[in-house]
Image (spheres, rainbow, N blue to C red):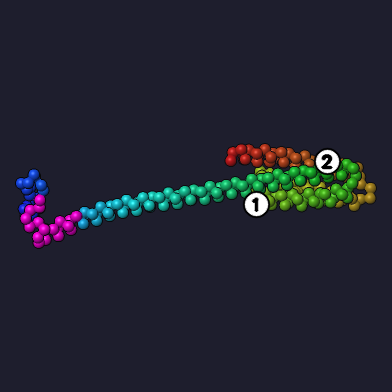
Amino acid sequence: MLHSNCILLAIGANGGTMVPPEGFFAGGVWFNFASLMLTALGSLLGAVALLIALWQLGRTRRAAEAAQSAAEDAGRSAKQAAERTAQVVTLVDLTKLCSTSSEIVHLIRSSSNETAVNRAHQLRRDLVRARESAKSHKVADGMDWQGLVTQAASLHKALEKLVSEEEPHVTAVSRCRNAASDLDEELHTVAAHAEVSIGERHANT
């Protein structure tokens, strides 16, 4: 421990001016004082550096969180856009299917059975493609796609048999017409329900 004469400042007689005691700058007193000041300054600078580092760390963390949030928002937006596109495609497919089924009904009524066979084949093919598209995009899951495909296949087979006969029986013609009308009505009902369901999904997003 330093002697009190070495660390106390003497008060001179000339107006109370603070003066260091004799021998203050001699020996190791000044060195110890300077070391103490440097240590205090170093601690202060270390504390400031720590505060700056913490501030930078917080700033970096906030920037990273903002970037992650933006990426998640972009991902959700892209997913929603893809889902909406798939839903629109499904509606377009259903509209096309309804148009084809209505045309088949008209062709049977006008005895254009050969053309009706071609349209029935096209309808079955388009139903299979629409089913696969809807399944892959997970839209219109409640639809009985397989039932519709089966109906279209049965209609196509019945029309082929009808065309193969030289003089189709009126019962066979009526059976094909009724099958085509039932399928057309079901497709229009499904399309209407799908449009309402997709509209509700869009309203909730």
Task: State the residue lying farthest toward the front.
Answer: 14
In the picture, measured across the screen, residue 112 lies left or right of residue 194, that is: right
Q: Position of residue 131 (x, y in %)?
A: 70, 49
- Where does the image place residue 132, in percent across and percent down from the top left? 69, 52
Instruction: Give the residue displayed 85% in from the left and 48% down from the top.
Output: 116
| Relative side of 195 to 178, left or right | left
Name the residue: 47% across, 48% down.
66
Residue 35: x and y in percent read 18, 58
Q: Earlier in the sequence, mark 1 or mark 2?
A: 1
Secondary structure category for the residue under label 1: helix
Amino acid of disc 1: Ser
Q: Nearer the viewer, residue 69 or 129?
A: 69
- The amino acid beneath tag 2 is Asn
- Dot label at residue 178: 2
User: Magenta span has 29?
Assistant: yes
In the image, 54 versus 166, the foreground residue is: 54
- Whether residue 199 appears in magenta in the rendering, the answer is no
Measured as percent of width and height from the top left, residue 146 is found at: 71, 48
Residue 84: name its quadrant: top right
Q: Indicate which disc residue 136 carries.
A: 1
**Is any atom of residue 123 visible in this view?**
yes
Q: Which residues are magenta?
A: 19-37
Task: Please give left or right for residue 116 compared with residue 129 in the image.
Answer: right
- Separation (CA) of disc 1 from disc 2: 32 Å
| Left or right of 121 on screen, residue 88 | left
The image quarter containing residue 23 is bottom left
Point out the image quarter for the N terminus.
bottom left
How many marks the image carries: the answer is 2
